[in-house]
Image: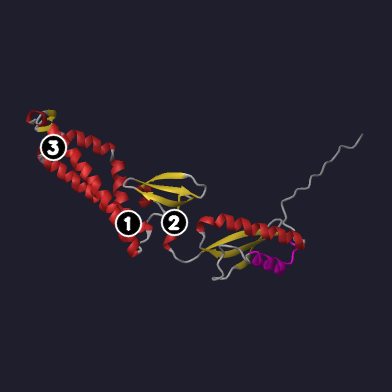
Amino acid sequence: MDDILNFVIISVGKVHVTVSHIVTVAITLLITKLIVWLFSKAFKKYSERKRIDLGRQHSIFQIIKYLIYFLAVIFIINSLHLGSSGLLISSGALLVGVGIGLQQTFNDIFSGILLLLEGSVKVNDKLIVDDIVCQVDKIGVRTTQVTTIDNISIIIPNSNLVTNKVINWSHSRKAARFHVDVGVSYGSDIDQVEKILLDSLSGQNGVERIPRPSVQLMNYGDSSVDFRLFFYSRSFFDVRIIKSDIRKKIFKSFKKEGIEIPFPQRDLWVKTAKEE
């Protein structure tokens, strides 16, 4: 039995990997996975009792999980008697090559650790990344998984969330301001237009009463007087639907009151040559 356990499988310089080493690694990994599973169950119950939000739950669990795996790796290295000097000498060139090739990967991993520690981006946060509106589903050690408002899943390297500009709508507990633009003909009654625009928000789901909505005359266009209707909402992910409902109400009200929404027109003159 001892001969089988001490059988050398791999030998690199002064480093010898035997069957017993492989068994030790396998058992350590199994025990580590069991510890992580037990911790996840206990931490979930604790979080529910303390009412910790899902985003912070995920961040804390990920940090502790990676710490457990890191300690397991240290234990494996010590149990295999891999001296740091011998390991580095025997595989120095390989480590340099891998380090250069995986530089971006290490950057993403470090960025993922920063995200988890800072809590600047958490699960269920609503973000705008590269003009893409999305919600965070999962933060991994290297990448973050998000879902867009079109229900498309996107994998984003964590370094993008650390180095690039990211708008996090979930950081603010206040309602955000949005607007709907509309143009009317120059013959329209602007007071009536303003009243119709404000009335279009009446009873609209997702629109806050305070701060109060407002209407501003933005510009005198080539063929229209341009208005902008401002309103506040906390339903950031559904704001496209809210805007669509508001535009429908405005269109119906304008049609009922005879208010014209102009569009660019061109006059075409056709000249015929005179007969000689």
Report crowding for label 1: few under 14, some 14 to 19, many 20 or more residues within 10 A (C-alpha).
Answer: some
First in sequence: mark 1 vs mark 3: 1
Q: Secondary structure at mark 3?
A: helix
Task: Give the x, y percent position of residue 64.
Answer: 26, 53
Closer to the observer: label 2 or label 3? 3
Mark 3 is surrounded, within 10 Å at the Cα level, by few (under 14), some (14 to 19) or many (20 or more) other residues, namely some
Sequence-wise first label, 2 or 3: 3
- Would you identify the image quadrant in which residue 187 lies? bottom right
Instruction: Name the residue furthest left.
Output: 2
Q: Which numbered disc flags the more N-terminal residue, 1 or 2?
A: 1
Which quarter of the figure is the C terminus placed in? Answer: top right
Q: Residue at x 65, y 62 (%)?
A: 227
Residue at numbered disc 2: 167
Magenta residue check for 195: yes
Magenta: predominant secondary structure element?
helix
User: As drawn, is 171 to the left or to the right of 274?
Assistant: left
Of circles 1 and 3, the one toward us is: 1
Residue 44: mark in rendering? 1
Q: Which mark is residue 87?
A: 3
Q: CA distance from mark 2 to mark 3?
A: 44 Å
Residue flagged by tag 1: what amino acid is it?
Answer: Lys
Percent x, y of residue 268: 79, 45
Read off the magenta span: 185-200
Using the rendered image of the protein, determine whether residue 140 is visible from the camera's viewpoint: yes
Q: How many marks?
A: 3
* Residue 18 visible in the shown view: no
